[in-house]
Image (tube, grey):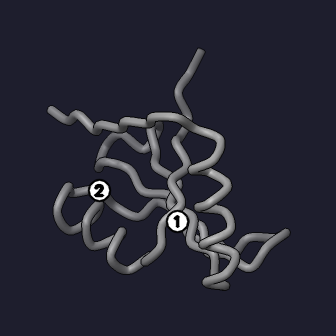
Amino acid sequence: MKYLHTAIRVRDLDQALGYYCGTLGFREVVRFQGHRRPCTIVFVAQPGDEGAQLELVWYHDPAERERRSATSRMTRTRTRAAIART
């Protein structure tokens, strides 16, 4: 099995990009607009390791962001995420 990407819903795309790209050193690989819902999707990866990406999803409508966030909270008990880099 090959790891492709992990999707992360973000409330503030600029802030998320500042963290992943500015602080952690990721680079933007591709950006596009969602085709079924109004959202912006940005794939980021560590330089030289574009095969393992993070998919940052930002919904344009604040109500949609909150609805999806609430749904996500209801369907999981505990989620922990970590990014390890060498």
Q: Position of residue 52 (x, y in %)?
A: 44, 38
Residue most toward the top?
1
Secondary structure, mark 1, is strand
Q: Position of residue 69 (x, y in %)?
A: 59, 61
Q: Position of residue 31 (x, y in %)?
A: 56, 70
Q: Up-down: is 61 above or below 26? A: below
Q: Up-down: is 68 above or below 72? A: below
Quadrant position of residue 1: top right
**x 25%, y 65%: residue:** 19
Distance Cα–Cα, label 2 vs label 1: 12 Å
Judge by depth and name the residue closer to the eye, 54 or 45: 54
Q: Up-down: is 76 above or below 43? A: above
Tell me the tag on residue 26: 2
**x 59%, y 67%: residue:** 41
Q: Is label 2 in contact with label 1 (beta carbons under 8 Å)?
A: no
Tell me the tag on residue 14: none
Q: Tell me the kind of residue under disc 1.
A: Val
Label located before the other in sequence (2 or 1): 2
- Count every numbered label the image shows and give the total: 2
Q: Quadrant of the C terminus?
A: top left
**Which residue bears the numbered disc 1?**
42
Quadrant position of residue 61: bottom right
- The residue carrying pointer 2 sits among few (fewer than 14), some (14 to 19) or many (20 or more) residues within 10 Å by Cα, namely many
Residue most toward the bottom?
61
Secondary structure, mark 2, is loop
- The residue carrying pointer 1 sits among few (fewer than 14), some (14 to 19) or many (20 or more) residues within 10 Å by Cα, namely many
**x 51%, y 54%: residue:** 8
Q: Tell me the kind of residue under disc 2.
A: Phe
